[in-house]
Amino acid sequence: VQLVESGGGLVQPGGSLRLSCAASGFTFSRFEMRWYRQAPGKERELVAGMLLPRGRRDYAESVKGRFTISRDNVKNMLFLQMDSLKTEDTAMYYCKAIYGSLHYWGQGTQVTVSS
């Protein structure tokens, strides 16, 4: 099982980034997929989650209207489009796969929002 995040980097406030998570080694389409983030000195928090490609999407209040989660079950990919980025969005971002008692995490990709 592998989850590999990419797309992080340094961006100015108001900018955009698109994170990707490449999944392998499990039946991706069956799993609920989520994005989490963890800032230095803070607990890891849920950013966004979805089960079906066109199904319900859940977002943290702090990112609603700015972030969009999506998935491609053919390519086994998860995405997070992040727009209107703020300095407080700076964190390590992780993707997570969930199916019953099975939980898989990626290694994370760093997002830094700074002028």
Image (spheres, helix red, strand yellow):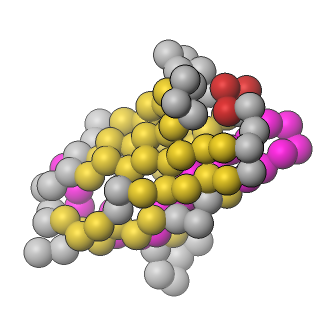
4 with respect to 101 (left or right)? left
Q: Residue at x 43, y 47 (%)?
A: 20
Residue 37 visible in this rendered orientation of the protein:
no
Judge by depth and name the residue closer to the eye, 13 or 108: 108
> Which residue, as the protein is rendered here, is positioned at the far top?
54
Q: Is residue 60 placed above or below 99 in the rendered structure?
A: below
Magenta span covers which residues? 84-104
Residue 87 spot, x, y in % from top left: 25, 68
Q: From the top left corner, tell me how far across and down residue 110 is, in percent.
A: 40, 69
Residue 6 against residue 41 in the figure, above or below: above
Instruction: Count how many numbered circles sit on residues in the image.
Output: 0
Magenta span contains residue 111: no
Residue closest to the far right: 101
- Residue 84 at x, y percent in the picture: 19, 50
| 113 and 31: which is toward the camera | 31
Q: Residue pushed farthest bottom?
A: 41
Which quadrant of the figure contains the C terminus? bottom left
> In the image, 114: left or right of 56?
left
Q: Position of residue 106 (x, y in %)?
A: 61, 59
Left or right: 31 as drawn, with respect to 67: right
Residue sitting at x 74%, y 31%: 27
Q: Residue at x 44, y 31 (%)?
A: 70
Q: Residue at x 54, y 46 (%)?
A: 22
Q: Is residue 17 left or right of residue 41?
A: left
Q: Based on the displayed image, in which of its 4 quarters is residue 109 positioned?
A: bottom left
